[in-house]
Amino acid sequence: MEKKKIHINLPAPFFEHEQLVPKFAKLAEKYEVKKTSYNTHEEIQPDLAWPDAFIMWSWPKFRDEEFAMAKNLKFQGQINTTRTTAEAALKAGVPMSEARHCWSPAVSEMALTLTLAGLRKTSQFHMEMRQGVEPWVEAFPTDIDSQERRLAGRKVGIVGFGRIGQGIADLMAPFKVELKAYDPYLPDAVASSFGATLTSVEDICANCEIIILCAANTDDAEKVVNASHINSMRSDAVLVNVGRSMLIDMDALLKRLEKGELIAMLDVFDTEPLELDSPFRKLKNAYLTPHRAGGIMESITFALDVLILDMEAAFEGKELKYQVREAALQCFGES
């Protein structure tokens, strides 16, 4: 029997990493595999007629014309996808699965990590001890920072209550927090099953001590937290962003932080890598991580395994577990 043809289009380092080389080698034992690192439509178009399946990230975007050229395509697997590609796949009738949810567990854990670090100031203590300038308590309890707090029992608001938000809710459960969530697409019953109360962004920003942003980067989520929301936050609120910087007005956030108000735990920025002269780097109440919430090797291997399983299901005429359906289109943006 002729082997199925698999085109894997991923950044070159994927094909060199010691944990991924055996995975691709195993695929090559069963299928005819082509590995490329194309970034443009011009690069990928000459190869479109060849494969039975694609496994890729999200670029180049597949439009109507790409699917029209992919005469033999029986499956499209993407680590992440765009609305353009998802809509074109549905129109072409090509089963497509995407695996961005495989990042979600790590992102949820990072959100909890940053929340605890913001409340207990562990990053600040670490840096001060590295520099030998840490303040030791000498007049207990007079010289204790009142902004250092426990998480247990506090009001926590989550903006975006999909897989990441729900994962955060699960991780928060032992702390018995008062949990609020904003998500315009979520039924009340789903929020309630995680112990959360659906409410508005205004309510979360004005009344929660911990505010976590993890909504998808869809068009209607741009600056879902605006200047007015930021100015309504408690001066000691801990703001955690593990979603995208477009979810919040970064200029307004910077102005509030420069007043010495709020504690911001930021994993995402308008420009990445973050400029060396960014004012966020100079703020004592801004704690920064370089977009590392989800991108660990466990996320990558999980995503590839999911796509391979769905690809093989497609070849065997079985149901795909992670296939993109029309009802999910509202969840996708263009980046």
Image (cartoon, rainbow, N blue to C red):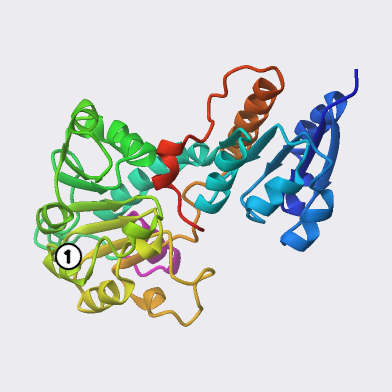
On screen, residue 300 versus residue 107, left or right, reads right
Bounds of the magenta span? 122-134
Give me the residue at 84% from left, 23% from top.
30
> Residue 192 placed where, x, y %?
18, 29
Q: Residue at x 30, y 47 (%)?
A: 160
Relative horizontal placement of residue 249, taking residue 181 as reference (left or right): right
Task: Determine the image quadrant of residue 302.
Answer: top right
Q: Residue furthest bottom?
A: 277
Whether residue 133 is in magenta: the answer is yes
Q: Nearer the viewer, residue 240 or 66?
A: 66
**Vertical position of residue 25 compared to residue 329: above or below:** above
The answer to whether residue 121 is visible is: no
**Can residue 103 be seen in the rendering of this structure?**
yes
Q: Main secondary structure of the magenta part?
A: helix
Q: Secondary structure at mark 1?
A: helix
Residue 116 position in % (x across, y down): 29, 47
Residue depicted at 60% across the width and 29% down the height: 306
Under mark 1, the amino acid is His
Name the residue at the right extreme: 1
> Which residue has dot 1 on it?
229
Residue 333 pos. (x, y %) = 46, 54
